[in-house]
């Protein structure tokens, strides 16, 4: 059964916003008390949070689909809907969030670090919030927006100061078990270690972590064996320790060739050339191992490596090694820039961004793309003429109609707002003013006006009747 997972694809869905309410306040002796429809609640977010108690992505391997709750719709009496509950997903320290194309969205390091993977939809405004001096009695409300839907990839890169690398059965697990309190599985056959092991080492006043990276063999960087899965756990380490077996029973292996092969795999993986290296010659408690260590040590030192002869089983040479690693870790920490380890990629908009773009496609259709137009379309109830007119006014004020004219659009041309798979398509009719502005009295009612002289009220009513008969004799305010 799988117990350690360091890469998963996660499908997250934020909650949708609740719809706004279109309502008119009514009570005894006050039948038209004004609009009192409340706003819809906001949908819940899906948030990733670093939790030190979590060490694997196993939960998301078994349950990759996660969804936050929706916001509740608004109600009459100016009652707003309840916001949806956020969904908080704990992830291990060192989790990298990527999109499906491999672009880094966030690099989460440090307990409590958060990243919003999917934002909840906005709640729709009720007609009370849409009322204004010009529009005193809106007969419509805005719909809630759908929440974000994203497919993200989570990769775990172990956060450690020192990485132990080497062939299987070279003694890495034994070494980490005696340097720290870690208790890895140890045996004398290859691939005993199937997951990275972490141990905490104290050397004087320095406390550092050591990771045992398993599965490195020739071809590991190309996917052979287990190496490709775990090479990413070396990336965050400040110091690399080559653990070489001086008592191997394989006739075609020796410490120098093992070192060359592992270095070649690290070079093929890339990005590790600047890490200081230390060579550990293990198993000197075996007579042949001691002789071989003394034989190859001059060659290793000539290559510029700092060499330590140890025996993890007999506990020989461990103190000198632990203090030497502590010194290298302290230097790396001192040289590290004083900045937050967490990295969240932000892509700001250009200062001259109009908020939308108009383009003409091969079939002659004009397409409007942009955050605001697409959001406004999602919020519009197209079964309500007044809501459609309100949308037309917003698009006109944003400059969409002007840009369509510049792009060569003519009366009757098709215009689509939104992505290809979910767009609103209509035949465009250029106007000096958009729908609701042309209707003039939409959302207005003289019964909400301040008192006026009787003669003025009679003249105003007659003018309104004449205008309604000419252009809008089928319009009713409610």
Image: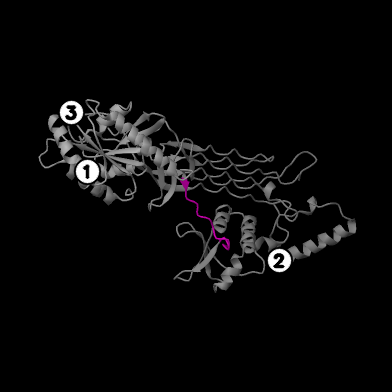
Residue lying at the far left of the rendered structure: 251
Q: Is residue 344 magenta?
A: yes
Q: Which residues are magenta?
A: 343-355
Instruction: Characterize the magenta stretch by its predominant secondary structure.
Output: loop
Label 1–label 2 contact, CB within 8 A: no
Residue 437 x %, y % = 69, 62
The answer to which of marks 3 and 2 sits earlier in the sequence is 3
Residue ID for mark 1: 300
Cα distance between the residues tagged 1 and 2: 95 Å
Mark 1 surroundings within 10 Å by alpha-carbon count, few (fewer than 14), some (14 through 19), many (20 or more): some
Q: Nearer the viewer, mark 3 or mark 1?
A: 1
Q: How is the image coloured?
A: one colour
Q: In this orientation, which residue lies closer to the viewer: 54 or 12? A: 54
Q: In this rendering, would 401 be left or right of 28?
A: left
Q: Which residue occupies 55% across, 39% down? A: 84
Horizontal side of 438 relative to 61 (left or right) equals: right
**Element assignment for label 3:** loop
Circle 2 sits on which residue?
471
Give above or below for 56 relative to 220. Answer: above
Compute the Cα span from label 3 to label 2: 102 Å
Q: Could you tell which of marks 3 and 1 lies nearer the N-terminus?
A: 3
> Which callout, 1 or 2, points at the residue further toward the start of the chain?
1
Residue at 31 percent of width and 51 percent of height: 270
Q: Quadrant of the N terminus?
A: top left
Judge whether residue 197 can be spotted in this image.
Answer: yes
């Amino acid at each position: 059964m799988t117990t350690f997972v360091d890469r998963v694809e996660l499908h997250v869905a934020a909650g949708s916003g609740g719809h706004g309410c279109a309502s008119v306040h009514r009570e005894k002796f006050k039948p038209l008390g004004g609009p009192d429809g409340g706003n819809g609640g906001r949908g819940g977010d899906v948030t990733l949070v670093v939790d030190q108690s979590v060490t694997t992505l196993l939960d998301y391997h078994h349950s990759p689909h996660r969804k936050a709750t929706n916001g509740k719709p608004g109600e009459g009496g100016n009652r707003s809907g309840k916001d949806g509950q956020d969904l908080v997903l704990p992830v291990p320290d060192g989790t990298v969030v990527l999109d499906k194309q491999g672009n880094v969205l966030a690099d989460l390091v440090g307990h409590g670090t958060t990243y919003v993977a999917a934002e909840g939809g906005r709640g729709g405004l009720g007609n009370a919030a849409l009322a204004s001096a010009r529009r005193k009695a809106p007969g419509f409300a805005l719909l809630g927006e759908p929440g974000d839907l994203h497919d993200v990839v989570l990769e775990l890169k172990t956060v450690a100061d020192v990485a132990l690398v080497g062939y299987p059965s070279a003694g890495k697990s034994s070494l980490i078990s005696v340097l720290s309190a870690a208790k890895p599985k140890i045996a004398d056959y290859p691939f005993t270690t199937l997951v990275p092991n972490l141990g905490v080492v104290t050397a004087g006043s320095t406390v550092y972590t050591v990771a045992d990276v398993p599965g490195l063999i020739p071809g590991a960087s190309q996917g052979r064996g287990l190496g490709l899965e775990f090479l990413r756990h070396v990336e965050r380490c400040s110091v690399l320790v080559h653990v070489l077996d001086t008592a191997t029973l394989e006739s075609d292996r020796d410490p120098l060739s093992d070192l060359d092969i592992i270095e070649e795999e690290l070079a093929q993986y890339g990005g590790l050339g600047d890490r200081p290296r230390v060579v550990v010659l293990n198993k000197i408690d075996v007579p042949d191992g001691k002789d071989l260590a003394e034989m190859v040590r001059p060659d290793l030192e000539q290559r510029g490596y700092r060499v330590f002869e140890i025996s993890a089983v007999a506990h020989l040479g461990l103190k000198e090694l632990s203090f030497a690693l502590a010194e290298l870790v302290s230097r790396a920490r001192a040289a590290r820039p004083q900045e937050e380890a967490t990295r969240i990629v932000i892509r700001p908009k250009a200062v001259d961004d109009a908020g939308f773009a108009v383009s003409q496609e091969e079939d002659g259709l004009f397409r409007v793309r942009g955050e605001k137009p697409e959001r406004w379309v999602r919020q519009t109830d197209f079964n309500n003429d007044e809501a459609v007119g309100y949308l037309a006014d917003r698009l006109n004020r944003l400059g969409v109609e002007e840009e369509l004219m510049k792009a060569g659009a003519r009366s009757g041309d098709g215009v689509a707002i939104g992505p290809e798979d979910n767009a609103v398509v209509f035949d465009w009719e250029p106007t000096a003013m958009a729908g609701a502005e042309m209707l003039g009295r939409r959302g207005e009612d003289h019964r909400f006006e301040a008192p006026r002289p009787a003669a003025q009220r009679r003249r105003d009513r007659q003018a309104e009747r004449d205008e309604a008969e000419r252009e809008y004799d089928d319009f009713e305010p409610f």
